[in-house]
Image (spheres, rainbow, N blue to C red):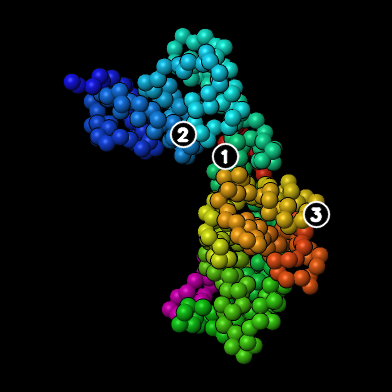
Amino acid sequence: MNSPTVTITITPEERDIILNYAELPKGVAARLRFAIQGDAELEVRLSEQEQLALAQSLYSAIDSAPDSDTAFAISHLISRVAPLEIPDMSGEFDRSLFPPDMPDEICREIYERLHTGEFESLEDAFEAVEDIIYKHNAAPLDAYHGLSTEAAYHLVGNGWNEPGAIIQLRDNLPLEELAESHYYHNAMALMRALDEEGGAKATARKNLNRSMVERMTREMRGERIAESLTVCNPKNRNETDIWPIHFVRVLLEAAKLIRLYKGKFQLTKLGRQFLDPARAGALQAHLFTAFVRSINIAYLDRAPEYAGVQATYPFILFAVRQIAAEEVGMEEFAQKIFLPAVEEEFEEHEYFSDRDFVARIRVAEPLADFGLLTIKTINPEARYFDREETVRITPLFDRMIRFDFENAAAADY
């Protein structure tokens, strides 16, 4: 006996959304691709089981939608294709009726609305549920430092410096404001050296040669370079023995300011333009953008990749601004700069958490080396993991980084 079937009608655009974002039952994807088109709509015949599976996959697809418009389109699709009746809410609250990752307070509010409301159709009920979810998405959350879910989504997802991006970097700061930016000064030191010497021969491992490394030990600055020099052989200093020098070279390549060409590191045309001290602010902003966007910052340490850290760096910077406007302990700093979904990924070890390690190596120290944060050690004589430290943003942080939540492209949250 054949299973009952239903016919759903969708637009070609909706068909593409389903194919791109939903995990479809076997055979359904093919039927969608070859659906018959008539009067600007497509007709697709599905069994009741397939229709239920499609609805469930669309529910799951909302979380992976790239923007709020796509998420709304998926929600609208669910309201039309879901073969579900309005749940019976006449009894006690049943948590199992709701998605497991939906916060309890939202589940209870939806339950109360469906329990007390009268709806003429499933679409009316779905719109009521959608209104509740939208309201919660627009509410400020303590875990997001006062941002709503929607605002945090736009902050992380709208890019850097582009039109519509919330996070904006000032690129016209004068040289004197960058006195504490080791990345700026160290990048300039290597770029000037390459310019003066007509490039530098690379080693077989494609690193700076020892002569250039020796010059950089004299011309680059920063406590991490000084620390590296105390533990490596002064007669055989390779680039990778002095990690801050190595990383500046890697950063300059990622920023397309130097390149390896015919066995020599040389300035690029773009790099030569940044030699002008009048463009100090532009170089600082360019290097910072390359750091957060063009380099895998997990390269800084040996912890697992934790890709969510780099993906949510705009939120991390916003959190740093809220937490470290006044001096705060490094431990509290590490506890509060990550989104909850990123936080739960960190591994816990017997004596330390990867969260604390990553917060220091991928966030605090780089920001300090860009002159955006100060790190103060209270007991410098203690072992590395036993040190008590505080952090605080510098005036340069607010001079250089701006969060434009009034940006017109992000105004609909």
Q: Is residue 10 above or below residue 255?
A: above
Around disc 2, counting alpha carbons within 10 Å, would you say few (fewer than 14), some (14 to 19), or many (20 or more)? some
**Residue 119 in the image, given as x and y percentages of width and height:** 49, 10
Q: Which residue is mark 2?
A: 62
Q: Secondary structure at mark 1?
A: helix
Range of magenta residues: 255-268
Q: Quadrant of residue 61?
A: top left
**Viewer-proximal residue, 368 or 119?**
119
The quadrant of the rendering that contains the C terminus is: top right
Q: Which residue is mark 3?
A: 327
Q: Earlier in the sequence, mark 1 or mark 3?
A: 1
**Residue 69 in the image, given as x and y percentages of width and height:** 48, 32
**Viewer-proximal residue, 159 or 125?**
125
Q: Earlier in the sequence, mark 2 or mark 1?
A: 2
**Residue 363 in the image, given as x and y percentages of width and height:** 65, 58
Q: Is residue 341 above or below residue 198?
A: above
